[in-house]
């Protein structure tokens, strides 16, 4: 029985939107309980002070990397701490609306799916989005990924990937950067998993607004798509069925991306002094 959702939030220098996204995800009204696990991936813009304040208030659970390790490492650290039966990644940039998480959760709660992706491109795209290079890069990569893995997804690269925590851990994720999206989808495909999609709202931002993915990442994605199609064997138990109905025992602690065992009930963070403004 599914009773809790773990929302995993990787953060690296997201000060302009951080308070708002934390307020929205902690205040979500969902049919089950939810927890918010944040990993500060070496922020230096003041995000770390905001996160320490939220952690001290008990509204989030926080783990910090002392240097920037990449989005993939941050997700893996967050998974080590997850207590929920289902987990999803929420980026701190608010390109994706946390209000859509309830819709992604519904087919899993109804036992219609074990995996649900939030597609940014299921709706007809507005002209400004269709004219952006990022949009067409996503369309090219998505088409290539579908062809390589025999999928029919509209958005394999979405940040909204919701699935059971047991399945997240079976993937044995290794990618340190943005290419973790290719690893997740590629391993799910090679395990024969059925991936459901639901449309979600998408508000893209530009590089000057803090978007961190760059043109060179396109080449990294191409390499990762090929790597997880031909070279890397996904971790799966013998005799697993193609519909994710088979399950395997997963230990209650998970491998840390830096090779450190992080107990699931431990929250660690840097102690950052919060300086109160002077009273005039």
Image: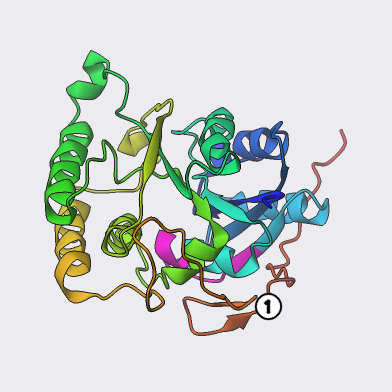
x and y percent of residue 82 in the render? 64, 62
Instruction: Name the quadrant containing residue 183.
Output: bottom left
Q: Is residue 46 above or below residue 225?
A: above
Residue 261 sits above or below residue 266 on the image: below
Q: Residue visible at 39% across and 69% down?
A: 240
Mark 1, residue position: 263
Q: Is residue 182 shown to the viewer in this render? A: yes
Look at the image and give the residue range highlighted in magenta.
Answer: 63-74
Picture quarter containing residue 224?
Answer: bottom left
Q: Tell me: residue 124, above or below residue 9.
A: above
Measuring from the top left, give residue 124's x and y in whole percent.
27, 18
Res 70 seen here: no
| 66 vs 251, nearest the viewer | 251
Observer-nearest residue: 267 or 68?
Answer: 267
Q: Pick the quarter of the image with the C terminus.
A: top right
Provide the secondary structure element on which disc 1 rests.
Answer: loop
Membership of 72 in magenta stretch: yes
Relative to 125, is 32 on the left or the right? right
Question: In the displayed structure, does residue 17 sit left or right of residue 62?
Answer: left
| Colour scheme of the picture | rainbow
- Outermost residue to the right: 279
Left or right of 267, for residue 157 = left
């Amino acid at each position: 029985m599914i009773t809790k959702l773990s929302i995993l939030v990787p953060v690296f220098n997201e000060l302009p939107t951080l308070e708002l996204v934390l307020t929205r995800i902690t205040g979500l009204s969902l049919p089950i309980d939810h927890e918010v696990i944040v990993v500060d991936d070496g922020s230096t813009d003041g995000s770390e002070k905001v996160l320490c304040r939220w952690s001290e208030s008990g509204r989030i659970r926080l783990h910090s990397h002392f240097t920037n390790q990449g989005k993939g490492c941050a997700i893996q650290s967050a998974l080590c701490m997850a207590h929920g039966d289902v987990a999803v990644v929420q980026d701190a940039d608010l390109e994706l609306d946390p209000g859509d998480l309830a819709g992604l959760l519904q087919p899993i709660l109804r036992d219609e799916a074990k995996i649900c992706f939030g597609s940014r491109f299921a709706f007809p795209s507005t002209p400004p989005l269709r004219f952006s290079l990022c949009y067409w890069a996503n369309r090219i990569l998505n088409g290539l990924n579908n062809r390589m893995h025999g999928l029919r997804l509209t958005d394999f690269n979405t940040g909204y990937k919701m699935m059971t925590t047991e399945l997240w851990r079976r993937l044995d994720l290794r990618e340190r950067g943005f290419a973790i999206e290719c690893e997740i989808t590629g391993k799910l495909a090679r395990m024969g998993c059925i991936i459901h999609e639901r449309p979600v709202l998408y508000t893209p931002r530009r590089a000057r607004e803090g978007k961190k993915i760059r043109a060179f990442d396109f080449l990294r994605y191409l390499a990762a798509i090929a790597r997880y199609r031909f070279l890397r064997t996904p971790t799966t138990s013998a005799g697993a069925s193609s519909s994710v109905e088979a399950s395997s025992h997963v230990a209650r602690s998970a491998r840390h991306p830096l090779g450190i065992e992080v107990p699931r009930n431990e929250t660690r963070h840097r102690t950052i002094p919060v300086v109160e403004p002077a009273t005039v």
